[in-house]
Image (cartoon, rainbow, N blue to C red):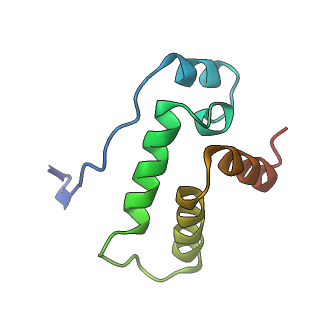
Amino acid sequence: MAFLGAEIDNLGYIPFTRDVCAAAKSQTPFFLAFPSSPAAAAFAEIATQLTERSAPLQRTTESAFLQGTLRSLAEQSPQNRRESLQEAWAIQ
């Protein structure tokens, strides 16, 4: 699919569920509030696909950090993912 002259790959979608709505109302990322939800699983799957892409990202500090973060999130269990993100973002 092309958008503004760039090729865009469809990596999936995040299902819009009650969990997503509840997380939005509480102003908490849905993957932290409901780490076992279908939306969090879809998010993890998209993160996995992004880390496994064959086209290398431009090598910058930001891209290396993003790749490491996505890889780490994709490899963790939902509970560990939540704890890691809470610690990183100091979300209580």
Question: Percent from the top left, x then y, of residue 17?
Answer: 47, 20
Question: Percent from the top left, x then y, of residue 77?
Answer: 61, 50
Q: In the drawing, does residue 43 fall left or right of residue 88?
A: left
Q: Quadrant of residue 53?
A: bottom left
23 up-or-down from 63: above or below: above
Question: Percent from the top left, x then y, of residue 62?
Answer: 57, 72
**Relative depth, front residue between 38 and 58:** 38
**Relative depth, front residue between 3 and 38:** 38
42 up-or-down from 65: above or below: above
Q: Quadrant of residue 9?
A: bottom left
Which residue is pictured at 48% across the width and 41% down the height? 41
71 up-or-down from 73: above or below: below
**Relative depth, front residue between 5 and 61:** 61
**How many labels, in total?**
0
Which residue is pictured at 70% across the width and 51% down the height? 80
Q: Residue furthest front?
A: 77
Which residue is pictured at 47% across the width and 44% down the height? 43
Which residue is pictured at 47% across the width and 32% down the height? 38
Q: In the drawing, does residue 43 fall left or right of residue 25?
A: left
* Placement of the C terminus among the 4 image quadrants: top right
Question: Percent from the top left, x then y, of residue 61?
Answer: 59, 79
